[in-house]
Image (cartoon, rainbow, N blue to C red):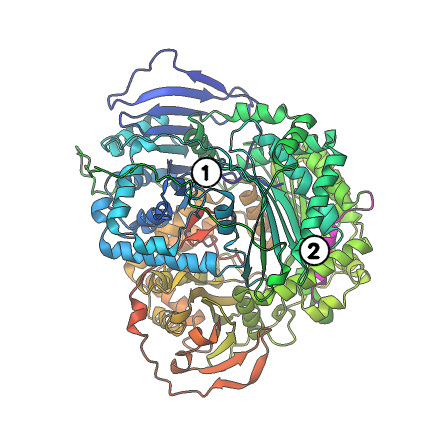
């Protein structure tokens, strides 16, 4: 199901609530608090209603405050959403909303530069910010004793920012945004597609005709005064919604908000905007060439904005045409192997909607034929019509998606904030629910006829470089400025007037007592066939999450390395239907229940993930039984998946990240170790696979005695275990799990260079294969703690050096990544191409210097940050299920978290140094560099290491790339030290999101090699 990105931001959902909230607006104006704050309304829950209770207040300065009280977990989520995004910008000054989001993390009057990250992470919390076309938001999830600190931080940058904005900070962040655009737009496959569509679909000057990140030319023209004016115009409290949710008391929240936000002055008034949908007199064809393997066709029809009465019907139309295995596009393009990807979706924003059909053809295939296939599919829909089952599946899926999204406080807070920002009504869910429930077949047909049939579209072709002949049709549209009228000046006469306080705002609030976190109570049952089952009751929402993990995965191919990739392909085949259901029938059955079941193949395990509404659990488990025990194994499905796998393997060498990971793995593991081969296999091994190989792998290795099941949800053990009877009949098998090899370090440090022409960024991997398997309370855990300071935290030495001090990267990190098997220690980053050699030098310098020990301040930061993370670890069903899985995977005692806490509290600097000296070698490391030879290679030979060149598949090119020089390393060029950057990424919907690097509590998350 394709979900819309804009108005259920934290959930990634659109709708579906089964009951209506009890809204209690004040019959007469509520008495204001001593600070002048008015209670506007209160929404409560009756019984088991699926609603989000809240209280809504308005401060005298216009700030809207929403409070959601939820004591299920000892944490708090704070969100400040400003109703300003790139749509408030003007021609010639694009990218300001996103640019200003960067500036909001550069310190304010009472908070030092970069201290937002350090303060929140040291409190055991996480923080982030994001920008879209229509809004910018900033948010923190913290333990409940850190609420006041979070409010203090957000209030300070709302009311006391501009004096801290310097020319130097402005230049640093301008450089950051320009580098981000280079990496995430200009250098990313298909990265410019959205910009081409936007400037072709919308009239010149329309707020959506440019991208959120803006243009390089506009960034170059901007100055610090422009940026300050943007803040003064749009960042007033009257254009913001502050939402606080979690383990809080509303009266205390109101008091704190009045203290920190109340004195901030109201900003200029902000009016909502409405614009008509674009009108296309003819199909507009546009194209460009990119570093891609698969030609892309996109057809985009203008539709309706979010909350329009027709929005839900168009959503349903997109599901029917291209929303999964039951869709027409899947049947006509994917099933027939005429496209490697095809889908339809309907993203909507505040001002417009876009019905989008996207298809990627096979290499070398012209997009003119793909357009014909898409148009035939639309014609087929006209003849086919809409069925009752189509509508029923759409409704069920939406309801389940919403309910699952309510599992976290951040999700509920984000939903409330979005509804308030765009509609003024946080309790809009009943309206949205009614829209879905009232949907009919006639509605879907009507919107097809109104917005798609016979209507014109933007038709974009993205083709490989040098393959212009593959476009669907030659470009026929040129942007016209003829009808453009410049808007009024929004920025005249703005003045910065600071608030006057009655308290000392420079003092950071003191934290309350650390919350006591209760590890979820669990039950366990071991079946006679060897399957271990562990569960936990979680009644917050009526859902159940199950994880069935089968040990082995990719590692089982050690016995037959010529069949590498068979484990992954076998897992994929289980998703393609059962003896009773075809893949399409299975997908339809799951959609009718609002359930999902997926089987994934991994390096160490194969995992089945099951998600179901509690009321539909019996029917969902019946389907799970079919998938696990009676797979279909159809030859046509196998042929299609095998072809897709081979195309994916061929596509790997277009991506520097994948090239680096593959080369690094081949170096870490000996030639005979299967872990030196990607889990997808190689072209040669996959080419030789047959359906019989898949059947044999399944028969030999899918067994209960090498598996465990974790189950978390709104169900008791006595009610669910009878439903698991089918697993008791699952037959034991003699499965031999490989022992894994003993790690061997290289005899000396070498640089292995892979040339990737045209790469704007270089990918770096530094590390070695440790002799440390995972343990929760031994050397591995202690090594994880030691690395937290070096490269595990956002404020780690490596990240601050390469990102903030040098400006080489958007983010750098390091970590130990073992499971039951030994794994690598790896430091990694994607860096600016011209800073490649200097980045390698800094990586090595930081690793070696850390062997000298950590400071007292760093030890305190480590103990505070890791020690307070427990409040955020076990909130959702998925988190709880993963926790139970760790207990079973590693045979851990239920109180291992307490044991980790004791180790952390007793930790000394000498302990950190001992771990660093033992597990961070001064030499004997692999260094992999993937980049453009012309930009990345110069300087590598001057670092004192032998440089060996590899090809794109990780094979050694004959002889060393250069002669080994004298060991003395030369300093980095001074020019490379001139910039700083901030980690910002862009998601697939044009949203910019500042991401804090995260690691798991004990280093187990994210094995990636």
The question of residue 571 being in magenta is answered with yes
Residue 409 vs residue 220, the one in the foreground: 220
Indicate the position of residue 31 as horizontal and vertical percent values: 30, 15
Indicate which disc residue 803 carries.
none
Q: CA distance from mark 1 to mark 2?
A: 36 Å
State which quarter of the image contains the C terminus.
Answer: bottom right
- Is residue 548 visible from the viewing direction of this image? no
Q: Residues within 10 Å of mark 2 (few under 14, many from 20)?
A: many
Q: Earlier in the sequence, mark 1 or mark 2?
A: 1
User: Which residue reaches farthest top?
Assistant: 28
**Relative to 704, is 901 on the left or the right?**
left
Disc 1 and disc 2 in contact, CB within 8 angstroms: no
Magenta part of the protein: which range? 564-580
184 relative to 442 in the view: left or right: left
Q: Nearer the viewer, mark 1 or mark 2?
A: 1
Q: Quadrant of the N terminus?
A: top right
Q: Residue at x 20, y 43 (%)?
A: 506
Give how far across and how far down residue 393 sits, in percent: 69, 33
Mark 2: secondary structure: helix
Along the line of sight, the residue nearer the viewer: 763 or 872: 763
Return the x and y of residue 894 as percentages of the image width and height. Answer: 54, 47
**Residue at x-position 57% and y-position 25%:** 433
Identify the residue at image location x=51%, y=40%.
Answer: 5
Disc ID at residue 706: 2
Under tag 1, what secondary structure? helix
Tag 1 residue: 410
The quadrant in which residue 870 appears is: top left
**Membership of 677 in magenta stretch:** no
Can you say whether 999 is above or below 822 in the image?
Answer: above
């Amino acid at each position: 199901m394709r979900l819309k990105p804009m108005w259920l931001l934290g959930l990634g959902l659109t709708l579906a609530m089964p009951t209506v909230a009890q809204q209690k607006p004040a019959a007469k104006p509520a008495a204001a608090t001593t600070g002048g704050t008015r209670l506007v309304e209160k929404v409560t829950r009756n019984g088991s209603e699926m609603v989000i209770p809240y209280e809504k207040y308005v401060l005298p300065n216009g700030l809207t405050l929403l409070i959601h009280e939820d004591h299920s977990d000892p944490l708090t989520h704070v969100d400040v959403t400003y109703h300003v995004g790139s749509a408030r910008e003007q021609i010639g000054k694009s990218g300001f909303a996103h640019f200003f989001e960067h500036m909001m993390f550069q310190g304010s009057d009472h908070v030092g530069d970069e201290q937002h990250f350090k303060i929140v992470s040291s409190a055991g919390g996480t923080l982030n910010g994001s920008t879209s076309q229509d809004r910018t938001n900033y948010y923190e999830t913290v333990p409940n004793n850190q609420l006041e600190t979070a409010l203090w931080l957000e209030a300070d940058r709302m009311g006391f920012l501009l004096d801290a904005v310097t020319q130097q900070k402005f230049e640093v962040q301008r450089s950051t945004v320009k580098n981000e655009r280079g990496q995430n737009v200009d250098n990313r496959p298909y990265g410019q597609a959205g910009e081409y569509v936007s400037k072709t679909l919308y009239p010149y000057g329309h707020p959506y005709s440019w991208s959120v990140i803006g243009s390089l030319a506009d960034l170059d023209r901007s100055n610090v005064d422009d940026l300050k004016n943007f803040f003064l115009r749009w960042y007033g409290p009257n254009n913001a919604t502050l939402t606080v949710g979690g383990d809080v008391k509303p009266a205390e929240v109101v008091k704190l908000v009045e203290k920190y936000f109340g004195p901030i002055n109201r900003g200029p008034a902000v009016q909502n905007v409405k614009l008509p949908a674009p009108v296309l007199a003819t199909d507009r064809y546009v194209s460009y060439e990119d570093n891609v393997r698969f030609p892309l066709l996109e057809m985009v029809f203008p539709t309706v904005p979010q909350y329009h009465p027709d929005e839900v019907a168009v959503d349903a139309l997109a599901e029917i045409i291209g929303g999964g295995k039951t869709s027409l596009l899947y049947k006509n393009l994917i099933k027939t192997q005429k496209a490697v990807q095809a889908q339809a979706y309907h993203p909507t924003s505040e001002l417009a909607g876009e019905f989008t059909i996207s298809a990627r053809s096979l290499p070398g295939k012209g997009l003119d034929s793909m357009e014909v296939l898409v148009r035939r599919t639309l014609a087929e829909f006209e003849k086919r019509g809409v069925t009752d089952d189509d509508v029923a599946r759409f409704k069920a899926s939406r309801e389940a998606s919403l309910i699952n999204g309510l599992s976290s406080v951040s999700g509920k807070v984000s939903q409330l904030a979005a509804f308030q920002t765009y509609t003024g009504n946080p309790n809009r869910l009943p309206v949205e629910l009614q829209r879905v429930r009232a949907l009919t077949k006639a509605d879907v047909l009507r919107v097809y006829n109104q917005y798609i049939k016979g209507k014109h579209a933007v038709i974009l072709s993205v083709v490989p470089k040098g393959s212009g002949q593959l476009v669907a049709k030659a470009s026929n549209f040129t942007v016209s400025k003829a009808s453009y009228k410049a808007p009024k000046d929004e920025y005249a006469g703005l003045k910065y007037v600071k608030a006057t306080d009655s308290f000392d705002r420079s003092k950071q609030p003191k934290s309350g007592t650390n919350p006591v976190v209760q590890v979820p109570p669990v039950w366990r049952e071991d079946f006679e066939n060897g399957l271990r089952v562990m569960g936990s009751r979680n009644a917050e929402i009526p859902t159940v999450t199950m994880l069935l993990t089968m040990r082995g995965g990719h590692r089982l191919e050690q016995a037959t390395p010529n069949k590498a990739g068979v484990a992954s392909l076998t897992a994929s085949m289980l998703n393609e239907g059962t003896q009773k259901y075809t893949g399409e029938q299975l997908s339809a059955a799951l959609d009718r229940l609002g359930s999902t079941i997926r089987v994934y193949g991994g390096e160490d395990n194969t995992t089945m993930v099951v998600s179901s509404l509690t009321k539909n659990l019996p029917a969902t488990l019946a389907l799970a039984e079919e998938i696990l025990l009676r797979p279909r194994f159809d030859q046509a499905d196998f042929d299609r998946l095998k072809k897709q796998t081979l195309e994916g393997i061929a596509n790997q060498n277009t991506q520097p990240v994948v090239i680096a990971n593959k080369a690094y793995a081949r170096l870490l593991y000996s030639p005979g170790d299967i872990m030196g081969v990607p889990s997808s296999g190689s072209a040669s091994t996959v080419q030789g696979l047959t359906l019989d190989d898949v059947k044999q792998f399944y028969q030999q290795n899918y067994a209960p005695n090498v598996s465990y099941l974790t189950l978390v949800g709104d169900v008791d053990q006595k009610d669910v275990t009878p439903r698991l009877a089918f697993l008791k009949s699952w037959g034991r098998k003699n499965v031999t799990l490989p022992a894994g090899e003993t790690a061997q370090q290289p005899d000396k440090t070498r640089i292995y260079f892979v040339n990737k022409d045209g790469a704007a960024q270089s990918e770096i991997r530094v590390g070695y294969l440790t002799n440390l398997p995972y343990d929760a309370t031994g050397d591995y855990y202690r090594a994880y703690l030691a690395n937290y300071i070096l490269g595990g935290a956002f404020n780690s030495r490596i990240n601050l050096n390469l990102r903030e001090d040098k400006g080489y990267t958007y983010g750098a990190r390091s970590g130990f990544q073992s499971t039951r098997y030994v794994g690598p220690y790896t430091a990694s980053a994607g860096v600016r191409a011209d800073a490649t050699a200097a980045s390698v030098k800094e990586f090595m310098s930081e690793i070696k210097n850390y062997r000298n020990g950590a400071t007292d301040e760093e030890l305190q930061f480590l103990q505070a940050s890791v020690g307070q993370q427990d409040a955020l670890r076990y909130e959702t069903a998925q988190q709880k299920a993963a926790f139970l899985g760790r207990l079973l995977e590693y045979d851990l005692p239920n109180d291992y978290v307490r044991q980790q806490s004791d180790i952390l509290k007793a930790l000394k600097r000498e302990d950190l140094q001992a771990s660093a000296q033992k597990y961070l070698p001064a030499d004997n490391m692999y260094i992999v560099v993937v980049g453009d030879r012309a930009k990345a290679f110069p300087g590598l030979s001057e670092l004192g290491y032998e440089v060996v060149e590899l090809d794109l598949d990780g094979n050694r090119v004959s002889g060393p790339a250069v002669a080994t020089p004298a060991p003395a390393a030369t300093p980095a060029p001074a020019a490379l030290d001139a910039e700083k950057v901030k980690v910002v990424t862009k998601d697939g919907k044009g949203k910019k999101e500042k991401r804090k690097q995260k690691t798991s509590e004990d280093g187990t998350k994210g094995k990636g090699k």
